[in-house]
Image (cartoon, grey):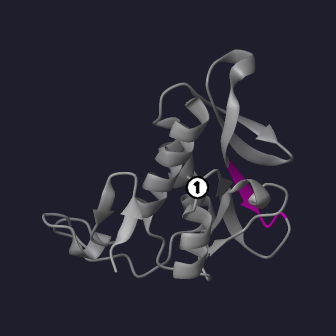
Amino acid sequence: MPRRTRAGTRPAPQESPGRPATGVSAGRAPDPRPPSPEDRVERLRALCLSLPEVAERVSHGEPTWFAGAGRRARVFVMLADHHHDDRLAFWCPAPAGAQEFLIAEDPDRFFRPPYVGHRGWIGVDLDVPPVDWARIEDLVADAHALVVG
């Protein structure tokens, strides 16, 4: 079943026309080593900071990304580096119904985070290989859009 994104549906990354499969760069063999936790955090950071009016600050002991200017800035992604469990993950707000859909679709990768899960936020486990960065990019962009309105 194709996954839902803010742009409707699209094929999984390995099915995308004109794009190499996940973990493969044009002309290079895939790196057999999984990305380190630091690499995954840096990639998430780059995704967040690529969006407009985003600032990173530490909140609750974790890197957190805020969207908006000044006192109106609101959290749209929060890293959860073994915050309440044994996983590297992030939490973000999601559109109505997305939390239930994602958890039902892939309960090993998606979860209802503590404190904010009751408000529809989704937790995304970055320790479950392979990390689907195209989907994470969509989730981060959706979270940003929800916060900036």
Question: Callout 1: few (<14), some (14-19), or many (20+) C-alpha neighbours within 10 Å?
Answer: few
Residue furthest toward the front?
Answer: 97
Decide: is 1 above or below 88: below
Residue at the disc numbered 1: 96
Q: Quadrant of the N terminus?
A: bottom left
Residue at image location 48% in from the left, 59% down from the top: 136
Q: Quadrant of residue 122?
A: bottom right
In the rendered image, residue 120 lying in the magenta stretch gets the answer: no
Kindly tell me whether residue 106 is visible in this rendering: no
| Position of residue 106 in the picture relative to residue 22 (left or right) | right
Where residue 26 appears, x then y in whole percent? 18, 65
Q: Quadrant of the C terminus?
A: top right
Decide: is 23 above or below 94: below
Where residue 2 appears, x then y in whole percent? 33, 74
Q: Secondary structure at mark 1?
A: loop
Which range of residues does the magenta coloring cover?
Answer: 78-83
